[in-house]
Amino acid sequence: MSRKLIMIIGAIVLVTFFALPVFAIEPEQQQPIVQGDPRFTRVLVSGDSIVQAQPDTAVLSISVVTQATRALDAQQDNATKSEAVVRALKAAVGAGAEVKTSGYSLQPIRVYKQNQPPVITGYEARNSVTVILSDLTRVGSVIDAAATSGANDVGSISFTLRKDQPARDQALAEATREALSKAQVIAQALNGRVVRIVEVQEEGTIRPRPVMEEMMQMRAADAVANTPIEVGTLDIRSRVQLIAEIEPNAR
């Protein structure tokens, strides 16, 4: 093939290539991400409920406190009295109750004077016992037994509810109904309706009922009178927050 023929063929190929139509390839269009149906309005509402229930458990903190010039004397005196107190408590609480040591300390008694180092004048031993009982009618007699056997500090007494599930369920149901009712009121004000509940959060608490510590200490020191205890009721609280979707202007 001659050089002249090759040049002619090459020219024809170039002309044919540039004469072809050009097609633009467009990138694929992505669908927008929809965060929620724009027809619906979201509202955050809350509901609260307080259910009162009778406690079924009493928790008492009872201590024997002794002091002496020597640490050994304070410790031994405390051990003798604490043993008597524990025996008396176990006899008074009845079956099913729990008596356990919750704390023990032996510390120096220091006297502080201005511009002088502290001076140790003696030692104090403290043996604390926790009593847990379900027979609430025995609480007063347990305190009396502790005081007459040598206990000299009733640090605290509180009432709580161990079998709390029924009361918790009642409080939760009432709080949920209140929150849902609020959402429905808002929907009605918008001439709409609640279409669905998006999210629900719940929190509930039981508030133990303490008895005045000062009164308990004073009664424990008086071994003659019987200690009256009024149990009262417990407040079981529940709070529910929910997010509801409302369709306004529903037809």
Image (cartoon, rainbow, N blue to C red):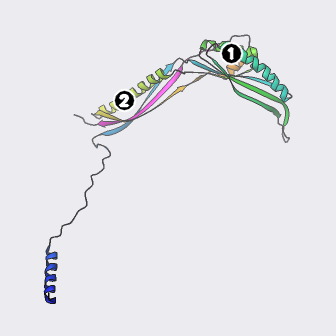
Give the image location of residue 1, x and y in percent: 14, 87
Secondary structure, mark 2, is helix
* Distance CA(mark 1)–CA(mark 2): 50 Å
The answer to which image quadrant residue 17 occupies is: bottom left
Label 1 sits on residue: 90
Counting labels gives 2
Question: What is the residue that sits farthest to the front in this orientation?
Answer: 1
Label 2 CA crowd tier, 10 Å (few <14, some 14–19, many 20+): many
53 or 96, which is in the foreground? 96
Instruction: Tell me, yes or no, whether the highlighted magenta stretch contains residue 102.
Output: no
Closest to the observer, 25 or 112: 25
Which residue is at the front of the view, 81 or 200? 81
For mark 1, give the secondary structure: helix
Mark 2 is on which residue type?
Leu
Q: Residue at x 48, y 22 (%)?
A: 165
Residue bounds of the magenta highlight: 223-251
Q: Earlier in the sequence, mark 1 or mark 2?
A: 1
Residue position marked by numbered label 2 in the rendering: 180
Residue type (three-letter) at the residue carrying disc 1:
Lys
Residue in the picture at 78% in, 22% down: 79
Is 211 on the left or on the right of 251, as rendered? right
Q: Is residue 156 left or right of residue 84?
A: left
